[in-house]
Image: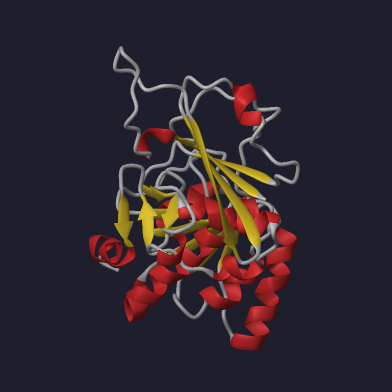
Amino acid sequence: MIVTLNDNEHIDRSFKNLFGVFLKRIYSEEKVFNDIRILNIYINKKVNGKKIEKLIPADVEAFLYSGNLPNLKDNIFKKYVPSKSFLCNICVNAFFKVLDVAKERSKDVRIALLDPEGCYFSLLEKLIFYSKDIAVISNNLKVYTEEQRRLMKNYGAAFFLNSSEEHLFNYNLIIAPKEIRRPIFLKKDSAVFTSCESKASISGTVYYKYKFNKFLYLNEILPADISQELFLAALYDIYKVRKLSEFIPNYCFNGYKYLPIKDLIASKKL
């Protein structure tokens, strides 16, 4: 079961006490999605956590939180956090969607893959068909040297390989699926696609969160304050719905707002 914990400000509360303050209240509703039970609990901020506990079944596998909630004990209501695997997959899907929308223009774009651990070498076989100028920055030179030989043999394709992030300055479109842990100096018009917000300093525009178009069938299941992206991540991580890793986002977050991919393409002149 998935349990969502929500501020109940969206529930119609017409009964007030003499002082005009809403009385303590908990409201819950159960939904079903593909045989998965979902319990949506709406909580007044004044409600004691012990009263909420009484509503929680024993078979809870994830708690999804809305933004405005009381301080619930994490050992009881442990907030679900999407796995890095799911977030990285969605990041990669967004990146290739950008290249697909750019079409032939992408061949003139200098593309770099930042992959310190060498986990994403399989992306190269797809990348070589989008651009004539590709670089890989990785500390795992062995795996990429082997991949370079294979691609040269099968496609006659080569790429620049180095371990220093300094070379990223020469590229204007960078894919870094995992968290960027070191500062990166880029040109102002460069764009970076990654899977989470980095604490390191990165010049250029960084896209690190992604959204899908609204799935109407989820409107009947999820409260307004629970993002569908969070819910889909839980299905992927907890219920092993692996096909969700193939979903392609429609919007990319640049630190200020979500931009449609088609608008992002226009702004970058790809």
Is 170 located above or below residue 181 in the figure?
below
Give the colour scheme shown: secondary structure
Residue in view at x 24 percent, y 60 percent: 267
Give residue 76's position: percent from left, percent from top.
Answer: 69, 29
Q: Residue at 44% x, 33% y: name it.
A: 7
Q: Residue at x 30, y 47 (%)?
A: 257
With respect to residue 105, does 187 lie above or below?
above
Which residue sits at x=69%, y=54%? 238
Q: Where is 192 relative to 76, above or below?
A: below
Residue 199 visible to an observer of this rendering: no
Q: Nearer the viewer, residue 208 or 170?
A: 208
From the viewer's perspective, is 205 left or right of 44?
A: left
Front residue of 260 and 167 = 260
Q: Quadrant of residue 132?
A: bottom left
In the displayed structure, 252 sits above or below 65; it is: below
For the C terminus, the quadrant is: bottom left
Residue 8 x/y as whole percent: 42, 34
Q: x and y percent of residue 100 in the render?
A: 40, 76
Count of numbered circles on the image: 0
User: Would residue 20 be seen by someone viewing this image from the given angle?
Assistant: yes
Q: Horizontal and vertical percent for residue 53?
A: 66, 30
41 displayed left or right of 17? right
